[in-house]
Image (cartoon, helix red, strand yellow):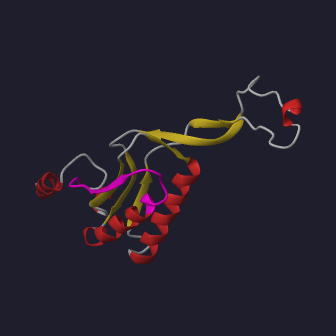
Amino acid sequence: MPCDEFPAAAHLVCDEDQQLTAEALEAARIAVNKYMATNAGKDFFHIRIRPHPFNVLRINKTLSCAGADRLSSGMRGAFGKPYGTAARVDIGQVLISVRTKEEKIQFAVEALRRASAKFAGRQKVHVSNKFGFTKYTKKRNIMTTRL
């Protein structure tokens, strides 16, 4: 079974309602990937980035030079140009999940702690009692594999 390879999982959980930009999610992914590859080995983990940045952020650029009031139109037609994308996240939503072997779970916790520095606000690291990314607990999965 494919999930037998990485039975332990750790999650980075958001503690605030906020928007996370695509750039912040990518920076966190790179931080987790680099730390896990150097400390756990590049074949001993699987990362999943959970939120997707669908919301388009827009900016209404204004001039700030002398005589700008004659050149700009102010708030007329202020819809703005696309500036970037962001994901809206809620309290308790999982941001990043890492599954790995049981003996490498402390590296996953440290990697997620480092990734939390890439986001604004508060995040918590949660070590799951589930078997990898499945919905089954480790005890139940051990019992079913013995049968």
Q: Please provide the residue range marked out in magenta.
A: 115-131
| Image position, residue 76 (x, y; %) | 76, 23
Q: Does residue 83 appear anywhere in the picture?
A: yes
5 or 118, nearer to the observer = 118
Q: Nearer the viewer, residue 53 or 48?
A: 53
| Residue in the foreground of this view, choosing between 122 and 67 | 67
Which part of the image, by quadrant, shows the C terminus? bottom left
**Total marks in image:** 0
Measuring from the top left, give residue 66's x and y in whole percent. 87, 42
Residue 1 visible from this viewpoint: no
Q: Quadrant of residue 12?
A: bottom left
Residue 57 is covered by the magenta coloring: no
* Residue 78 on image: x %, y %: 72, 27
Q: Is residue 114 above or below residue 133?
A: below
Q: Quadrant of residue 125?
A: bottom left
Q: Is residue 130 left or right of residue 142?
A: right
User: Compared to 125, does 74 lie above or below?
Assistant: above
Q: Report the residue at 55% width, 37% height from top.
A: 54
Residue at left offset 54%, top offset 59%: 27
Asked if 75 appears above or below 87 in the picture, the reply is above
Residue 122 lies within the magenta run:
yes
* Residue 58 image point, x, y percent: 66, 36
Q: Which quadrant of the figure contains the N terminus?
A: bottom left
